Amino acid sequence: MFASFARRITPPPVLREITHESALGAVEARVREGKSLLEAVPAKARVVALDEGGRKLSSTALARQLGLWRDQAARDVAFVIGGPAGLDAAVTRRADLILSLGPMTWPHLLVRGLIAEQIYRAQCILSGHPYHRA
């Protein structure tokens, strides 16, 4: 799903996966992962942290936000997905937007696909392409 939508996005998204030892305790794993995630975010990028406690936006509202950042000359937008223990507070503090996909827990591979589809949908909404409501 990710690859299918990533091919349609201009410019194509860059996927960076961060992995850590599962033997760590939840708190230590979250802190280490948070540090690694923040190190992977490009300088001056807008950060969207995915967290169940975040804002629930419609596709149109997300498109407006991405369009606003584009119009402000934001070069990069980084969508950050946490591990099983959730995102460290350092990541959510750095985030320009904390976004919720709802209260359910989703597997990372599915979230990647969902986010890629929403980025593609946002580009279609912003360009007037009929994909969003065809």
Image: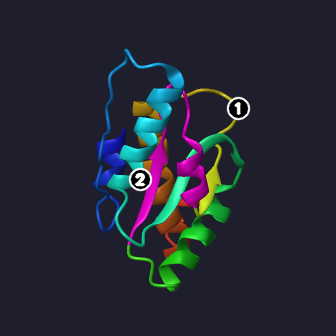
Q: Position of residue 93 (x, y in %)?
A: 60, 56
Q: Nearer the viewer, mark 2 or mark 1?
A: 2
Q: Is residue 131 visible?
A: no
Specify the amino acid type for callout 2.
Leu
Q: Position of residue 81 (x, y in %)?
A: 47, 41
The quarter of the displayed image where residue 86 is located: top right
* Residue at 63% across, 50% down: 99
At mark 1, the secondary structure is loop
The circle drawn on residue 81 is none
At mark 2, the secondary structure is helix
Q: Which residues are magenta?
A: 76-95
Specify the amino acid type for callout 1.
Pro
Label 2, residues with CA under 10 Å away: few <14, some 14-19, many ≥20: some
The circle drawn on residue 38 is 2
* Residue at 34% across, 64% down: 42
The residue pinned by badge 1 equals: 103
